[in-house]
Amino acid sequence: MKYVKASHVLPEKLIKEIQKYVQGDMIYIPKPAASRERWGSQSGERKRIDRRNDAIRQSYADGVTVDELAARHCLSVDTIKKIIYSKRS
C-alpha cells in the first residue's frame, strides 16, 4: 500500500468534507468488494495450490492412503482429509 496525497486525487470539496471528520491523519479507503482479487491470484500461488490439491484428490482416487499423501506433501492428515472431502471450487 502506498501513500497518495489527497489533493492529487480528490476534489477540493470532498477534501473539505473529509476534514470535518479527520485532520492530519492517514486513513485507509478499501477497494470495493467486487474489485478485490482472490488470495494468491497475482502471484500464481492460488493456481499452484489448486493443482496440488487436484493431484492429491487424483492420487487418493487411485488408491494412495491418506497417511501416505500427508507424508508425500508434508501436510497433516486432517489437511489431506479436508482437501479430499471438499468440493473443488
Image: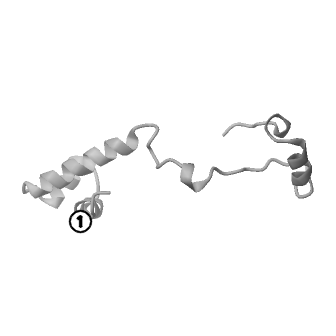
Q: How is the image coloured?
A: one colour
Say if residue 58 shows up in the picture: yes
Using residue 80 as the reference point, say whether residue 64 is left or right of it.
left
Residue 63 x/y as whole percent: 7, 57
- Residue at 20% over, 52% down: 56
Q: Quadrant of the N terminus?
A: top right
Counting labels gives 1
| Residue lying at the far top of the rendered structure | 8
Q: Nearer the viewer, residue 81 or 29?
A: 29
| Residue 43 against residue 23 in the figure, above or below | above
Residue 83 x/y as whole percent: 27, 59
Say if residue 24 shows up in the picture: no
- Residue at 12% over, 59% down: 65
CA neighbours of label 1 inside 10 A, class few (<14), some (14 to 19), many (20+)? few
| Residue 57 against residue 42 in the figure, above or below | below
- Residue at 11% over, 57% down: 61
Residue 59 x/y as whole percent: 13, 51
| Residue lying at the far left of the rendered structure | 63
Using residue 11 as the reference point, say whether residue 45 is left or right of it.
left
Q: Label 1 is placed on what type of residue?
A: Tyr
* Residue beneath disc 1: 85
- Label 1: element kind: helix
Residue 19 x/y as whole percent: 91, 52
Q: Quadrant of the C terminus?
A: bottom left
Using residue 39 as the reference point, say whether residue 4 is left or right of it.
right
- Residue at 86% over, 37% down: 7
